Amino acid sequence: DVKVTQSSRYLVKRTGEKVFLECVQDMDHENMFWYRQDPGLGLRLIYFSYDVKMKEKGDIPEGYSVSREKKERFSLILESASTNQTSMYLCASSLTTSGVPFLVWEQYFGPGTRLTVT
Amino acid sequence: AQSVTQLDSHVSVSEGTPVLLRCNYSSSYSPSLFWYVQHPNKGLQLLLKYTSAATLVKGINGFEAEFKKSETSFHLTKPSAHMSDAAEYFCVVSDGRGAQKLVFGQGTRLTINP
């Protein structure tokens, strides 16, 4: 079974703090994603990475950065946390199959980190 | 850009009755489509996926969905609801032809009445 783990289930931080959220997957997936989930808004993509040291902005990258130094690990960084970043953060990973360009693989999700910024 | 609309934010059914969760999509290409489920305080779990093979897709826990290109729909159904089906359900479309990014609907909360 694919396993995606996130460093914390619950996190409370103060405004202005630098926050690190860690995600690790154990299935050698090329792609990794960070989403935030807010009631009534579904999941919104923050950043994703399709290879080590590669990253692309998603739909809501402002106020966030990411790091992918190893294939299995993808970190989300809040440089200066603000109250409007209080949310559930979900990490996911997926495969890419070379030679089959239009095959879209499902994403596997971690349990989420509920971040509260006070 | 690709998009997905879940037509009901909340659906309530009685145990043992059929479930219908509605989803319409917009895509410039032949899309890949997914349904995910999220139980309270849990991560998202894949229910089923459509990737241009059979238009009727069977998933886990008795759920199935039918891809209808003419109606741009991908509705999720189950013949008989169980209490354990109470959860939030997300319809998801691939963001472009072969793109590994996914676009999520806003979710439908399913409540099961005893």
Image (cartoon, coloured by chain):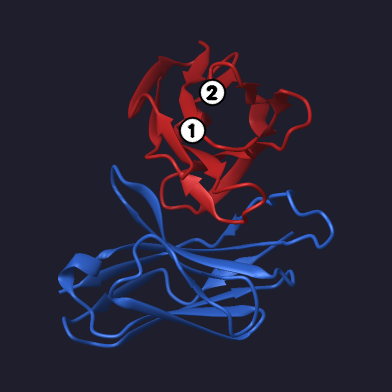
Name the residue carrying label 1: B26
Q: Quadrant of residue B33?
A: top right
Q: Position of residue B96 (x, y in %)?
A: 58, 48
Q: Residues within 10 Å of mark 1 (few under 14, many from 20)?
A: some
In screen coordinates, is A66 left or right of A99?
left
Can see residue A42? yes
**Nearer-the-camera pick, A38 or A110:** A38
Colour chain B is painted in: red
Q: How many marks?
A: 2
Q: Position of residue B74 (x, y in %)?
A: 56, 25
| Residue B22 higher or lower than B93, as above or below | above
| Residue B100 higher or lower than A50, as above or below | above
Colour chain A is painted in: blue
Q: Tell me which amino acid carries mark 2.
A: Thr
| Residue B67 higher or lower than A38, as above or below | above
Chain under disc 2: B
Label 1: element kind: strand
- Do labels 1 and 2 touch, CB within 8 Å? yes
Chain under disc 1: B
In screen coordinates, is B82 left or right of B8?
right
Residue drawn at 15 percent across, 74 percent down: A118
Residue found at the very far front of the displayed protein: B28
Residue drawn at 53 percent across, 66 percent down: A33
Q: Tell me which amino acid carries mark 1.
A: Ser
Label 1 in the same subunit as label 2: yes
Name the residue carrying label 2: B72
